[in-house]
Structure formats: structure tokens, C-alpha cells
């Protein structure tokens, strides 16, 4: 150690302290956003002297031990603490925040349309605004409030949805009402006594019992052909009933056509039996009528009642037939029954009439659904039950004879009581099946013929004739290469016309065809018997 001249040397020590510097260059950034299903965190950046520093994170102040930045997905406000350390520098402490706000979610009720008196529909909604297109982030079930109930008036009704919540509060849910539009219904029109209108002539103007679920004004029009009938018809004929109803608030205007037929009633005209002496003048012939309806009588008939009988004043003893004829009527179907003129020999007292036999006059009940005709002598009776009714019992003087239709041995004073009941009305399907039962191979026939089409191709035409009187909605045609099998379950063609061209044929092949008709009721087909088969060998 050096010393200065003239000075004494002195020795000693001292401490040098280097303090940690303030760590600069640390920056942090908050995150604020709307829920999007992704993870988000704060951002800590190191620059200048802070570069190379170590960052630790924590969710509690003073507890920063995480090396990874905490990330958050769900809605909420989060505070993240961090510490940055570096040798020779004071540890930098700070914090930043993560704020995630709920996303907007819309539940919109879908519009619906029904007709008046229909049950409420199944309501539904569209959900928009889902971040990941899945409803798993939602809890609860959508419920709906709507003031509509069966029978409420036509109009618009608000459909209000509700009931959902968002898991973790990630969505703010808005509900948008929809509209239920209730429109006018088509009226249902029917005639309750249609089967009764379709009847044998009874001299009654039977009014149709029209039924409708609409509250609109009803009008009923009768037509015979193209002629409008002002009132309910009583005469024989084929009629149409057109029922119209006006539109109302809840119902559309409607119309429906029905048909019925009044058929001729049977009327028996029987010549009275007579006895005369030989050589007598031709007697005045008379007839007995059985089967008049209502207040009808002989004056209701047309034509002139006449008789044929071969007897003349010169005729010999014996019997001669008296046959009535000459009457006409639009409402009755006549059955003329002959009587007998008995010519007896003279007993010395000269010619003249023989008093006729005594006619018995039993008392016979009258009522709806039947008529009773008696024989010329009144000792027999025939019960005629009208269509739509069935016989239950016949009594004579209170004694049941069962379901008999002919009585004999009657006399004046006997009391005949007839009991009938109205048959249950058949459904439309049952009526159709009864109608189709009229179709047989004898009145429904198929025919085939080979023809050449305009394009030069060969074809087999199938036609059919229907003489059953049944009106079809259509026919189905089946084909096979075998006469009695192989036709399959499905027709090769369904037609409403009277001809079918089968072009998928080959030369030398023999094809068999059969046809069946159908009538459709409420979307269901009811089938007739098969037609007689037709076949054709293609040449």
C-alpha cells in the first residue's frame, strides 16, 4: 500500500450495497366481451427490462402460484392476480379483470293455422342466437300460453312462449310471441232422414230433416232433372235435394247435394166375382182396389177402368174370367187380378143375377211402415212391409200369429193388429257394399282387342261393360300370363273411363285380364266382384 511522504499509513474497510431495481416494462390488459363459448383470460406483456421475467398467476391476491394464465368461458366478472419476478429486480405485482357478458338468445313462437272447432295445435318455436347450435346449454322446457280453446271464434290468438333458463347465465333470453290463426270451417251438412225419403210412394210430402253444424241460414232446393220443385215432392220420381248454408263468422258458405227416389207403389185391382142365370144380360162389372196410399182413391187414377169377359147373353152355363184393365197412374204399379163370372142354369125362375157372396170385413190396424190388403171375400189378408221397416208381430183378436204376412179364415169383427219397427239406418259404407253386391260376372264383363297404335306399336285394348245399374267411381285392371293365377295384388291400371290401352305386350304372348270396380267412401275403396275374364294372344 503506498504512503505519502511525510504521512503515516492508515488502513480500513467499507460496505457497498447494491439494491434491487424497480422492474419496469410490465403491462397488463383486461378482457371484456360477450359469451361466445370460448375461453378468455387477461393479457400480461413484458418489455424492456422485464423481458425474460417469470410470470405467475393466481385467483386470490398473494396466492400467485399458477404458471398458466386462468381462462374463463361462462358469463361473469373475474379478477386475475399476477406477479413478475426477475433477478436483481423487485417482483412486480398487479391484477387485471375478465368480464364476460350474457349473449342474446331469442325464442320465437312459430305461427300456426287451424280451422274453427279444431283442437289447439302442437305449438313450436325457433331458437336463434345459440353460440354452438346446441340446446344443451339451456334448461327447462318451453311452455306456451294461448287463449284459444275449442269453440272459440275465428280470429288471431297470441302464442306466448316461456320456460327456459340458460346454464351459467350465459344467455339473456327474449321471447317473441307468435300468432295462431283460426280460420272458418267448412260446414258439415246432412239429411237425417235421407233413407226415409228414399221410399215407395206413400202420398206424403215428406220434408227432409236437414242438419248442419253451421249457424248460417239454410236453404233447401228440390230438383227433378233440371226442374226446380217448389215443395217437398210426393209423386213418384228421382229427385235431388240441394242444401246450401250461408257463410258466418265461423263457417264458410257450403252446399251439398243428396238424392232420393220415390218408387211406384203396388196397387191391386181385382174384378169382383159375380153369379148370374144363364141367358142373363151382361152384368155391370166392378173392381176392388187394394193398396191405395194416404187419401188416394179410384179418382186419383188415370185412364178408364174397363173389363174383358167372353160372356155374352148366348153363352152357356159355366165360368168366365172377368179381367180388369185400362187404368194408368204415375204413382202406382198395377196388378190386375181376374174375377170369375159364374153362369148357372135356370131353376125355373127365369134369368137374373145371383146375389154375390157376403164379403167379410175384419178391422185392420193402420200405421207407418206397412199396408194390409184383403182378398175379394175379406177372408184373407196380406201384410206388405215397406222398405226400411221389419215385421215384429201380427195379432188376430189379441192372439199373436208371429211374423206372418198372410192371414186366412178372417170374418167380420176380427181385429188385426200389425207391429213393425224401423230398421237401423245403414252407414254409407254398408250402403255401398250392398250396392256393389249387385255386380256379377253376368252384368260386368271385360273385353279385349288387339290394335295398332299411331307409333306403330302393338297394343291390347281393354274395355268393359256394366249393365248392373251400379255407378262406379272407377275400375282397376289386372293382367296375368295365366288364366287363374298370377294377377298380383296391384292393378296395372286404374281408370275412370271405359277403355285402357295395354302397350307393354309381346308378340306370341297370351294375356289374361280381369277388372273390378270400386266406390270410394271417406278415402276407403270398396270393391265389386271380378268381371268375367278377357284374354288376347298378340299376333
Image (cartoon, rainbow, N blue to C red):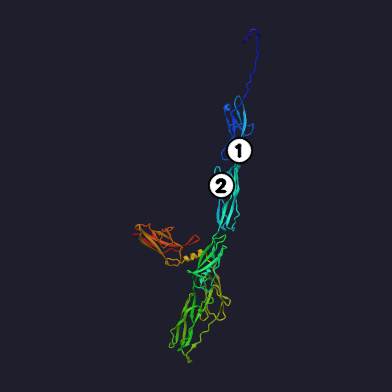
User: If the image is split into quadrants, where does the N terminus sit?
Assistant: top right
Total marks placed: 2
User: Looking at the image, which is closer to me, 335 or 479?
Assistant: 335
Which comes sooner in the sequence, label 1 or label 2?
Answer: 1
Please tell me whether residue 203 is drawn above or below residue 357 in the rendered image: above
In the visual, does 41 lie left or right of 465? right
Name the residue: 61% across, 48% down: 163
Name the residue: 60% across, 38% down: 99
* Residue 128 horizontal/vertical position (percent): 56, 46
User: Looking at the image, which is closer to me, 426 or 416?
Assistant: 426
Disc 1 and disc 2 in contact, CB within 8 angstroms: no
Say what secondary structure mark 1 lies in: strand
Q: Quadrant of residue 475?
A: bottom left
* Residue 75 horizontal/vertical position (percent): 60, 40
Crowdedness near tag 2: few (<14), some (14–19) or many (≥20) residues, C-alpha within 10 Å: some
Determine which residue is flagged by label 2: 127
Say what secondary structure mark 2 lies in: strand
Residue 173 visible in the picture: yes
In the visual, does 195 lie left or right of 82? left
Determine which residue is flagged by label 1: 99
* Residue 381 horizontal/vertical position (percent): 52, 77
Q: Which mark is residue 402?
A: none
Q: Quadrant of residue 166?
A: top right
Amino acid at each position: 500500500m503506498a504512503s505519502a511522504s511525510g504521512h503515516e499509513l492508515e488502513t480500513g474497510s467499507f460496505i457497498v450495497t447494491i439494491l434491487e431495481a424497480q422492474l419496469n416494462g410490465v403491462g397488463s390488459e383486461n378482457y371484456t366481451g360477450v359469451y361466445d363459448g370460448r375461453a378468455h383470460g387477461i393479457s400480461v406483456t413484458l418489455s424492456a427490462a422485464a423481458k425474460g421475467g417469470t410470470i405467475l398467476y393466481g385467483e386470490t391476491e398473494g396466492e400467485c402460484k399458477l404458471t398458466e394464465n386462468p381462462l374463463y368461458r361462462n358469463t361473469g366478472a373475474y379478477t386475475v392476480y399476477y406477479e413478475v419476478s426477475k433477478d436483481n429486480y423487485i417482483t412486480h405485482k398487479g391484477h387485471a379483470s375478465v368480464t364476460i357478458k350474457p349473449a342474446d338468445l331469442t325464442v320465437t313462437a312459430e305461427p300456426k293455422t287451424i280451422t274453427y272447432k279444431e283442437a289447439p295445435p302442437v305449438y313450436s318455436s325457433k331458437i336463434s342466437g345459440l353460440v354452438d347450435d346446441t340446446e344443451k346449454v339451456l334448461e327447462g322446457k318451453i311452455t306456451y300460453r294461448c287463449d284459444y280453446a275449442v269453440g272459440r271464434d275465428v280470429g288471431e290468438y297470441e302464442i306466448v312462449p316461456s320456460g327456459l333458463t340458460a346454464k351459467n347465465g350465459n344467455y339473456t333470453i327474449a321471447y317473441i310471441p307468435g300468432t295462431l290463426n283460426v280460420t272458418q270451417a267448412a260446414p258439415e251438412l246432412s239429411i237425417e232422414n235421407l233413407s226415409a225419403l228414399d221410399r215407395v210412394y206413400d202420398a206424403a210430402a215428406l220434408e227432409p230433416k236437414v242438419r248442419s253444424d253451421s249457424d248460417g241460414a239454410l236453404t233447401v232446393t228440390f230438383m227433378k232433372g233440371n226442374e226446380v220443385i217448389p215443395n217437398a215432392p210426393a209423386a213418384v220420381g228421382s229427385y235431388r235435394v240441394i242444401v246450401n248454408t250461408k257463410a258466418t263468422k265461423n263457417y264458410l258458405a257450403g252446399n251439398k247435394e243428396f238424392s232420393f227416389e220415390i218408387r211406384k207403389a203396388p196397387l191391386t185391382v181385382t174384378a169382383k166375382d159375380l153369379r148370374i142365370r144363364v141367358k142373363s144380360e151382361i152384368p155391370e162389372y166392378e173392381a176392388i182396389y187394394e193398396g191405395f196410399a194416404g187419401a188416394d182413391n179410384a179418382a186419383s187414377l188415370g185412364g178408364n177402368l174397363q173389363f174383358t169377359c167372353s160372356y155374352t147373353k148366348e153363352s152357356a152355363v159355366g165360368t168366365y174370367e172377368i179381367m180388369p184393365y185400362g187404368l194408368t197412374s204415375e204413382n202406382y204399379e198395377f196388378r190386375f187380378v181376374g174375377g170369375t163370372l159364374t153362369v148357372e142354369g135356370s131353376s125355373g125362375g127365369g134369368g137374373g143375377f145371383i146375389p154375390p157372396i157376403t164379403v167379410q170385413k175384419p178391422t185392420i190396424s193402420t200405421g207407418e211402415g206397412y199396408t194390409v190388403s184383403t182378398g175379394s171375400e175379406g177372408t184373407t189378408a196380406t201384410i206388405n212391409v215397406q222398405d226400411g221397416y221389419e215385421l215384429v208381430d201380427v195379432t188376430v183378436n189379441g192372439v199373436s200369429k208371429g211374423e206372418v204376412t198372410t192371414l186366412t179364415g178372417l170374418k167380420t169383427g176380427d181385429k188385426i193388429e200389425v207391429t213393425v219397427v224401423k230398421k237401423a239406418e245403414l252407414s254409407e259404407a254398408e250402403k255401398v257394399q250392398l250396392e256393389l253386391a249387385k255386380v256379377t260376372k253376368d252384368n260386368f264383363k271385360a273385353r279385349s282387342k288387339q290394335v295398332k297404335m299411331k307409333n306403330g306399336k302393338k297394343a291390347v285394348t281393354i274395355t268393359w261393360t256394366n249393365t248392373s245399374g251400379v255407378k262406379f267411381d272407377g275400375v282397376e285392371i289386372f293382367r296375368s300370363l295365366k288364366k287363374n293365377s298370377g294377377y298380383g295384388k296391384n292393378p296395372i291400371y286404374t281408370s275412370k273411363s271405359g277403355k285402357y290401352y295395354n302397350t307393354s305386350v309381346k308378340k306370341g304372348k297370351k294375356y289374361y285380364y280381369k277388372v273390378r270396380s270400386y266406390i270410394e267412401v271417406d278415402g276407403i275403396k270398396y270393391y265389386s266382384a271380378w268381371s268375367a275374364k278377357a284374354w288376347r294372344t298378340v299376333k
